[in-house]
Structures are given as structure tokens and as C-alpha cells.
Image: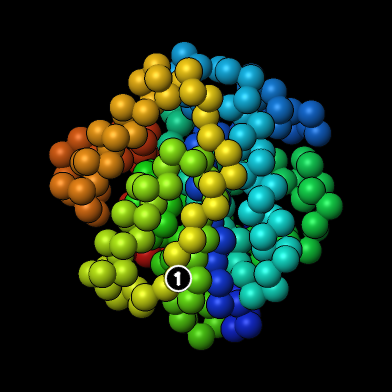
């Protein structure tokens, strides 16, 4: 999919962050955990992959309903097993499932293929919107689609970007669309505590550029793709 310019009528942004990489090619593959790379280690539970499909569907539906919205699938080439980006793979899911009956959303969909964490999912998608917009404006409203337990983290990211004017980004209305969540037994097995720790780390390094957060970014760039990003 080509990241061509977007028309000036688009003022809103819908972001679907990637969580894993889909490597299937058939209509039934998006629901097959074996056709995904990078799902939660040790937790190939039945409803993980459908969760991600629901995120993609919600993003498509939001873009289809809001004629002023650009849809961005965000996520880099984070897995050493494949050079496919999370973002590109999410588009493949949409295509395998015929864009959930909303094929017009394809025309307002773009790929952000460099993000390695949640802060970059938000930041880079906003930067991509501004870079591709015919008037080079920033979005007025930003909606992130995702898992319920990550809502606080994304709100923290949005508050930091808005309050600091990070990278020259102008204030925007932020909304988090918590489509679904991972099962309680997975949260209790460590994901809940891990999310708490990650939030605390982002409170200490709000731009994710220090300590273990920076290390994670390095690990999630196994193909040396990160430095090729067109925005700084």
C-alpha cells in the first residue's frame, strides 16, 4: 500500500496499533494463531488473535463512518522471524476479510511502519498524518483503538505530547476506544504487573528514550529498519 498524500478534508486520525505480525494469506487465516508471529509468549489463548482482528475491524468501521478520518495502522518490523511490518500485516488482515464490507476505508488507510512501542504508535502516526496531509496540518481529533488495559498508558502519552508540544504537534482531542481486553488469567499471570511497570517507566522517561524503554526499542528493530523512518 502506497503512502500517498491525503486530501485536506481529512482532519481526524484513527490509529490501530499493532501487537503482532500476521503472516497468513487466506480468508480463514486471520483467526489462526499459527499464522501470527509475536503473540504473547506462552499465551496462545484462543481469544488473543480475534482481539486483534476486532481492533482492525473497529478501525475500518470508524474510518468508514467518519468521512473526515484517516485510518493508520501502526507498527514496525519488530519480529526477527519476518520482515513484514505489523502495520502491513494488519492491512493484509483487512484485505483477507474484504475490509469487513467497508471497502471505501481502504482509500483513507495509510501505514506507519516504524513504531516500536505505544508512545511511537501515537507520535509517529500523528507525524505521518501531518507529513502526508496536503496542507501539512496536524489532526484535530485522534482516536486510538486497542486493549482496555492499555488505556491509561495511551492517555499518559497523549497528555505528554499535548502538554509539551512535542515535535511541534498542536493540541488535539484524544479518545481511546477500548474494544476488548486480554483475559483475566493472563493479566494475573503477569501482564497486569508488566503494564503497571511500563506505565511507571514512561512516567520517568515520558518519551520512551531512556532506560529499559530504550532497550526495548533496540530489541524491536531486528532488521535495522528504524533509522529509515521519514520523520524525526
The N terminus lies in which quarter of the figure?
bottom right
Q: Quadrant of residue 90?
A: top right
Does residue 36 sit above or below 129 in this rendering? above
In which quadrant of the rendered view does residue 102 lie? bottom right
Q: Position of residue 97 (x, y in %)?
A: 79, 42
Question: Where does residue 28 sit, x and y in percent of width and height?
Answer: 79, 29
- The C terminus, quarter of image: bottom left
Percent across and percent down for residue 32 are 69, 23
Front residue of this view, candidates 71 and 201? 201
Q: How many marks?
A: 1
Rendered residue at 56%/61% (across/down): 14
Q: Categorize mark 1 by other alpha carbons within 10 Å: few (<14), some (14-19), many (20+).
A: few
Can see residue 180?
A: yes
Q: Tell me: 112 left or right of 209.
A: right
Secondary element type, mark 1: strand
Could you tell whether 216 is left or right of 72 in the image?
A: left
Reading the image, the residue beneath label 1 is 173
Q: Is residue 178 above or below residue 216?
A: below
In the visual, does 66 lie left or right of 187? right
Camera sees residue 167: no
The colour mode here is: rainbow
Q: Residue shown at 69%/47% (left/top)? A: 57
Residue 54 image point, x, y percent:
66, 41
Question: At x 55% / y 52%, what residue is drawn?
Answer: 177
Q: Residue at x 41, y 67 (%)?
A: 127
Q: Nearer the viewer, residue 199 or 75?
A: 199
Amino acid at each position: 500500500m502506497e503512502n500517498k498524500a491525503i486530501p485536506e478534508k481529512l482532519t481526524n486520525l484513527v490509529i490501530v496499533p499493532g501487537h503482532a505480525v500476521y503472516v497468513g494469506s487466506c480468508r480463514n487465516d486471520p483467526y489462526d494463531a499459527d499464522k501470527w508471529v509475536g503473540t504473547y509468549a506462552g499465551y496462545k489463548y484462543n481469544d488473543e488473535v480475534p482481539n486483534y482482528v476486532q481492533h482492525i475491524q473497529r478501525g475500518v468501521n470508524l474510518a468508514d463512518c467518519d468521512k473526515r478520518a484517516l485510518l493508520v495502522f501502526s507498527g514496525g518490523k519488530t519480529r526477527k522471524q519476518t520482515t513484514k511490518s505489523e502495520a502491513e500485516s494488519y492491512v493484509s488482515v483487512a484485505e483477507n476479510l474484504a475490509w469487513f464490507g467497508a471497502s471505501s476505508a481502504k482509500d483513507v488507510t495509510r501505514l506507519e511502519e516504524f513504531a516500536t512501542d505505544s508512545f511511537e504508535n501515537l507520535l509517529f502516526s500523528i507525524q505521518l498524518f501531518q507529513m502526508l496531509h496536503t496542507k501539512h496540518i496536524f489532526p484535530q481529533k485522534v482516536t486510538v483503538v486497542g486493549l482496555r488495559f492499555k488505556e491509561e498508558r495511551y492517555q499518559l502519552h497523549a497528555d505528554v505530547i499535548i502538554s509539551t508540544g512535542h515535535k511541534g504537534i498542536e493540541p488535539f482531542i484524544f479518545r481511546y476506544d477500548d474494544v476488548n481486553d486480554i483475559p483475566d488469567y493472563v493479566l494475573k499471570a503477569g501482564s497486569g504487573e508488566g503494564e503497571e511497570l511500563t506505565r511507571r517507566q514512561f512516567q520517568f522517561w515520558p518519551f520512551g528514550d531512556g532506560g529499559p524503554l530504550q532497550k526495548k526499542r533496540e530489541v524491536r528493530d531486528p532488521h535495522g529498519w528504524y533509522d529509515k523512518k521519514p520523520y524525526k
